[in-house]
Image: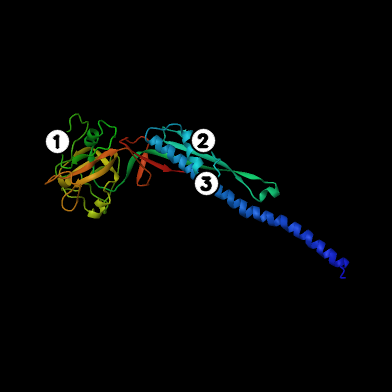
Amino acid sequence: MQRLTRGEADERGAVAVSLALLMVALIGFAAISIDVAATYAERQQLQTGADAAALAIAQDCARDSCGDPGVTAQNLAVPNSNDGDPTATVVSFDPVAGEVTVNNEGTSEHWFAPVLGHDSTLVSAESTARWGYPSGGISVLPLALSYCEWWGQTGGGTPSGTTPRTIYLAGRGPTPGCPGPSGTVPGGAGWLATDGTCSATSVISQVLLSDPGVSVSNGCTVADLVALRNVTVLLPIFDNAVGTGSGATYRVYGYAAFKITGYNFAGSYKWNEPCTGDNRCIRGYFTQFVDLTDAFDYSPTAPKLGAAVVALTG
């Protein structure tokens, strides 16, 4: 029979003690790697929920229907969390300045850290969104429409309905009761000098140069117009127009959202033609619209013509 010597027994005991000590370290490393990663994932979910909540509240307010921001925040936070137990709180809300901040808080349960005395970690994320009305930006259709057209089609200033109307670019005389200019200046047709491509950059109160003639602005292609079919675009609305032809200018009053449903701009620039012959026109309707891109700057004091801009700022 083989017997263990005292030295061999001591060595086996030492190995057992070393293994026990190493297990604590191994569990600690597991806690750091796995539990910390899980906590990070939880925070990402909370951040997504906070972003979604802040954007939703901002969009509601941009449409003049803020509702209950706290309820909106919680309703958006829960679907964006795997464990379903986040608590969203509106920590600041200023509808006049157009800003809301949402804090989203949840608990990350640990798998290995409880061995070290840490069962869970409280995690939170915060997001701020702002909203306002377009004060300047890049219009992907370099066309200005008159305040009178906007006023007449919206029934006095409130975009509603989805019934398209035809707007003649050469002007068809004043609209009864219109508080601003009607149509376009002779030879101006509403087309604007472009940035080199089929777009025009402008800001409120800026005087824009006309691109004279009845055809589309220089820089626009048939493909550019095709891409805008059934698309809502933000167009500059002018409240003053002077001059003729190449000397014509338009002063920007604000920006309105226009859904394009047809146009006849001569040559190959035709689709769902709303007018015929030598007439040049565009068909569609002004609508409520929230822009989430960075194409436009915004301000809570800019004219409210149905278009709004919402952005995450923190």
From the viewer's side, name the closer residue of 50 and 299.
Answer: 50
Residue 292 percent coordinates (x, y): 38, 44
Mark 1 → mark 3, Cα distance in angstroms = 57 Å
Badge 1 vs badge 3, beta-carbon distance below 8 Å: no
Q: Residue at x 45, y 31 (%)?
A: 68
Q: Residue at x 49, y 45 (%)?
A: 48
Taking the image as shown, residue 216 lies to the left or right of residue 312, namely left
Residue 209 in sight here: no
Residue 136 percent coordinates (x, y): 32, 43
SS assignment at label 2: strand
Mark 2 → mark 3, Cα distance in angstroms = 19 Å
Taking the image as shown, residue 280 lies to the left or right of residue 86, namely left
Taking the image as shown, residue 137 lies to the left or right of residue 53, namely left
Q: Residue at x 82, y 65 (%)?
A: 11
Q: Which residue is mark 1?
A: 173
Q: Mark 3 belongs to which amino acid?
A: Gln
Q: Is residue 24 above or below residue 168?
A: below
* Residue lying furthest left: 277
From the viewer's side, name the closer residue of 218 and 13.
Answer: 13
Residue 306 in sight here: yes
* Sooner in the amino-acid sequence: mark 1 or mark 3: 3
Q: Mark 2 belongs to which amino acid?
A: Val
Q: Which residue is mark 2?
A: 91
**Nearest to viewer (mark 1 / mark 3):** 3
Which quadrant would residue 240 be assigned to in this image? top left
SS assignment at label 3: helix
Q: Which residue is mark 3?
A: 45
* Residue lying furthest bottom: 1
Taking the image as shown, residue 113 lies to the left or right of residue 241, namely right
Which quadrant would residue 304 be assigned to in this image? top left
Quadrant containing the N terminus in the rendered view:
bottom right
